[in-house]
Image: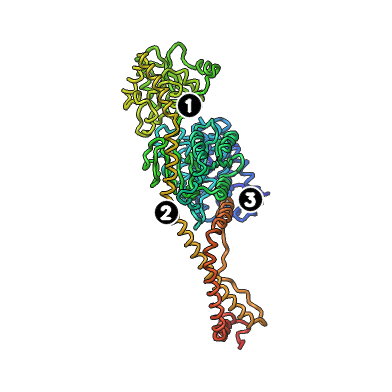
Amino acid sequence: MDVIMPKETGSAVRPGSGLGGHVALAAIAGLLDGDVNRRLNHRTPEAWTELMDVAITLIGLIEPAEREFLISDLRERIAVHSGQGHAPLLQACGALLFATIRRAAEDATAAGDAAALAAALGHLLALTVREVYDVAAYQQLLQDGLQWFWDDLDRPADILRDAVGDAIIRWAAVDQPMLALMGSLGDFFNFSVFRFEPSPVRQCKLAMAPMAALGEAMARSALPGRPTARPVPTRGGVIPVGYLAMGADPKDALTIPLGHIASILTALPGRFRFSVFAWGNIDPVFLDKLREMGAECHEVSWRTLSSFVAHIVEIERLLRHDPVSVLISDVNYSLPTALFARRAAPVQIFLQGGMAVWPVPNLDAVYNSWGSDPVQAGWGEARVQYFATPWDLNALNPPVRPEEVAREGASMPQGFRLIGTYCRLMKITEPFLRAVERILLACPDVAFVVGGSGDNPSIRAFIAGSPARARMCVVERYVSGHSWGRLLELFLDTWPLTGGESVRETLAKGCPVVALHSDEMPALDLQRDPALLAMDWDGFVAHSVRLLQSPDEMLAARRRAAEFAGRWADPTTFRDFLVNSIEMLVDERRPAVRAEQAAALLSLRDAKLEGAAARLMQEQLEAAEALHQALHEEEPRATLPNPTACPQSDPRSREFELLDEAQSLLHEQDRMAAEIGLLRQEMGWLTRELDRTRGSMRSFLPHYLPRLSQHVRKRLWRGGPRADLG
């Protein structure tokens, strides 16, 4: 291989590099600058591969401080070459850009430097669609970098939140969005908002635009004319209900609603049929228990499927084999977003137990456990109903484990009465800590402890400056809530993102909970002791101090906590709500679904009629062509270009080809039953139309042949070697 050295080093050489980095930058600049690139633009693919191998090796010699400049320089070149159509140079710059970012990301992960990794991935996320020369390579590089944050959920994924959100909006604008890429970005964005933002209202504001764009993009991925869903059953018939379960493991709090819903619906086989599509956290033993109840369970997880698109195709296939009238999702991640946006069932319900925002198309109802504002959450015209599952006291208050209690107690301040909370540490806000400080200053025999996963430096900073710092402790790890609920004398609920399972666990053990009303989660007030629910921080502090300074008040509060938990354990109210709600939603949607089905049948009829007309026209053209060939079969046929033929290019990725193929097959299967009656009606009409057309042709062609022969001679042979043919 002949190595082309640059005539000039160009702007890519920066002062401050080591000798190796200086030479490497100069060589890369020479590869891409001046009239060198015009020579390289005509190289063979093999030569390009050799040059790229050399250039990528040179990237390893560049000092980290110089990578930022190289990345900026390559992006400028990509913008220029994409506008001028220089494909080889565009590919070369893209490959070098990806190699540079990958090297920066590898160095950052090796050093455990979240900020450096975020900076490297930020360059990747900032690329426009035109700047990405290889979507598959882009997606793989991005997934490799994001995986580092997924591997440890306490790593600060929120530093990439805005960049990922902007990338979602940018990629969602593509006519045929890349589903696997969109799914990966959507899940990471959802995680980065929910896990690290303590305000539910702010979660909605941050997530609204990217999640709306994601839903619209997923909706566009459905085939045009595809029937939206199977029709709902007739009134009084068995209603098939499906449940998209990210949580199908008793260790996951998301699984709690699934267990209650399954026990209710499977106990009413004459009214409901229940199916579970488990795709996230799965415990096979738990699924077996659901099967014993009478549920149909499908495991469609990352363990069995290799890609996001495969998940969509497989679940849609299962839904056609096991059709449901109602589909419930326990989360708003990318997979349920795709299925809801593509209308997987006639009635689609969001069981909201986590982040509330979900501006997804085709959302029919929301079971609103927080009392979130439907407008802020982007639920559109969906029917919103309050939702709260009964409390399973056996799960909330299991037998004491003395060794675990002793181990957890050893991590807490000794010699004090203990108050505190356990949660994701990002839920601890400064107003909450100031209220705790006031309580401690009023009660010198009390210490405060907070434990949980996550990294919240503001807690440590507040404690360091507090006059009560000697009695404030933070345990930065996952802690056993069941043991903490037995060690704490008083549980302090967080704000504005209030507690869920932690509050229920604590109350079930007879430990009082002092809470502050949250306008952002008002429905959870119903799961608090009214006597200990404050409307402001002064009331929060007053309730806490009164209990800590009055043994009688504390004893009464402990008694109320146990009684309160017992009332919530009664499943009657929830059972009545669930059954009535599902039947009502199906009844409400029935007219709309029938109208959609009628429109789909009309569309099919129109398509069939258009197809029949096209076939008749084709028969006429073929007949005319046959006559022309018979007239001139002794003459060599000229090869003429077909003006209607043009090369077809498919810009879609392989995932879209797979998805379209699977959709087409499933769509055709779905349509066949609906088409049979229509085709029978059309058959007589088509037969009569074909007979009429053939009769017309027989009567018409004898008059038309002389004119056709003359016309063909003029059009095909004018000016040719047999122009005198008479």
Q: Secondary structure at mark 3?
A: helix
Lower position in the chain sequence, tag 1 or tag 3 = 3
* Residue 350 on image: x %, y %: 45, 42
* Residue 664 on image: x %, y %: 56, 56
Residue that appears at 63% across and 48% down = 4
Is any atom of residue 36 visible in this view? no
Q: Which residue is mark 2?
A: 591
* Three-letter residue code for mark 2: Pro
Residue that appears at 59% across and 75% down = 622
* Three-letter residue code for mark 3: Trp
* Residue 426 on image: x %, y %: 44, 29
Front disc: 3 or 2: 2
User: Which image quadrant is residue 625 in?
Assistant: bottom right
Lower position in the chain sequence, tag 2 or tag 1 = 1
Is any atom of residue 6 visible in this view? yes
Q: How far is the residue under mark 3 from the one under mark 2?
A: 62 Å
Residue that appears at 63% across and 54% down = 43
Q: Vertically, is 423 above or below 271? A: above
Mark 3: few/some/many CA within 10 Å (<14, 14-19, 20+): some
Q: Secondary structure at mark 1?
A: helix
Q: Which residue is mark 3?
A: 48
Front-most of 578 and 99? 578
Front-most of 674 and 222? 674
Q: How far is the residue under mark 2 from the one under mark 1?
A: 42 Å
Q: Which residue is mark 1?
A: 393
Lower position in the chain sequence, tag 3 or tag 2 = 3
* Three-letter residue code for mark 1: Leu
User: Which image quadrant is residue 561 in?
Assistant: top left
